[in-house]
Amino acid sequence: SVNFNTGTGDFKVALKAGAEVTGGAVKIDPVEVSVASGPVIEGTVDVVLTALPTVPIKGKISMDFPNAMFDVEAVFNGEIVPEVNVEARAKLAISGKPGDSFFFLGIGASADLGGMGNIRNVAAIGIGVNDARDRDATSFYLHDAPLDYLPPQTSFSGFYYKNAIKLGKTQAEAPSIDVMGLFSAKVWMYSYSSQSFIANVDRGGFQLRLSGGLGGGIDARVVKVIHLQASLAACYDIYGGYNQNDGWNFNGMAAGKAEIAIGDDASCNNISLVAPGVHLCINAKAQLGFTTRSGFNCDLSIGGDSADPCNLPPDL
């Protein structure tokens, strides 16, 4: 199709086509290309694999000559097997626009494992990317970068990598079962781990971080009278590098918690005689840190309350 505005002199030419290759194993349809005044050249393509006929890989390319912008992206978002959803992206963007010139290359994927876990894996390289954490073109790759190294509304020139996985369900996420009001229970178990590295020249810093944890428990009630609770949790978090606030820095933490209770009324490490019950709790945490700005710090604590020294697994 051809559109031409005689008043402004603007025009747009659009073409659309499709094709099958390798004996029909791959279908490329539709392929759309348009050229508008400027010129601005845009193209889109859906690539459909016979093995995944309902989930195309969507490609897009844009060359905006007036704004000196080149952008190409490929996106896959759908179920690869029933109830396992994957979003995968790859992007290259180059801008020579005054006040917003940058280079960005990113690749990444996130997956929902049918409600039984999540995976996130991203890598990105950037030079002079303004508002990199939140802008549409880059937020998929950088939205969870450490705030000390990439705060909102700041630029990114460097490298970021993250690999994280969470399996299982926490107590809040686990389903409950109930048998005619006579017996009810909730059982949960989870584990998680994360490895990340960021170097941002624009913030003058870098960080390597390793963290992980696991936990589980049971909460059961018989005829709404007998109540049993038991849970365990453990975690670690180790990171270090250099930033403008702390200088050279290192921090290591390990923690754990155990809790068991029979009955409803007893508080931690107490026995209730009013409504018979017992509640035992213990938590421990060890932390060692160092910064060139403030020196060493060390903390070792052992408690007898229900506070959890481990944060719940992060959302991925």
Image (cartoon, rainbow, N blue to C red):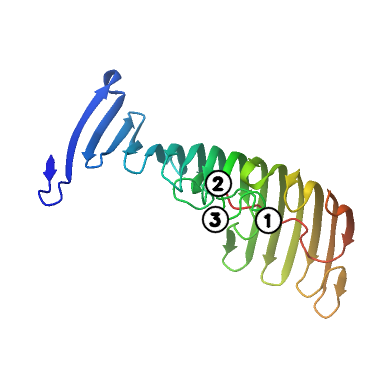
- The Cα atoms of the two marked residues, 3 and 1, are separated by 28 Å
Mark 3 residue crowding within 10 angstroms, few (<14) / some (14–19) / many (20+): few
Callout in the foreground (3, 1)? 3
Q: Nearer the viewer, mark 2 or mark 1?
A: 2
Label ID, residue 312: 1
* Callout 3 amino acid: Gln
Cβ–Cβ under 8 Å for marks 2 and 1: no
Residue at numbered disc 2: 142
Helix, strand, or loop for circle 3? loop
Upstream in the sequence, badge 2 or badge 1?
A: 2
Q: Nearer the viewer, residue 95 or 303?
A: 95
Do tag 3 and tag 1 residues touch (Cβ < 8 Å)?
no
Secondary structure of the residue carrying numbered label 1: loop
**Mark 3 — residue?**
153
The disc, 2 or 3, on the residue closer to the chain's N-terminal end is 2
264 versus 62 height, above or below: below
Please give left or right for residue 26 compared with residue 82 in the image.
left
Type of amino acid under label 1: Leu
Q: Which residue shows up at 15% across the image and 46% down it?
A: 9
> Farthest residue in the left direction?
6
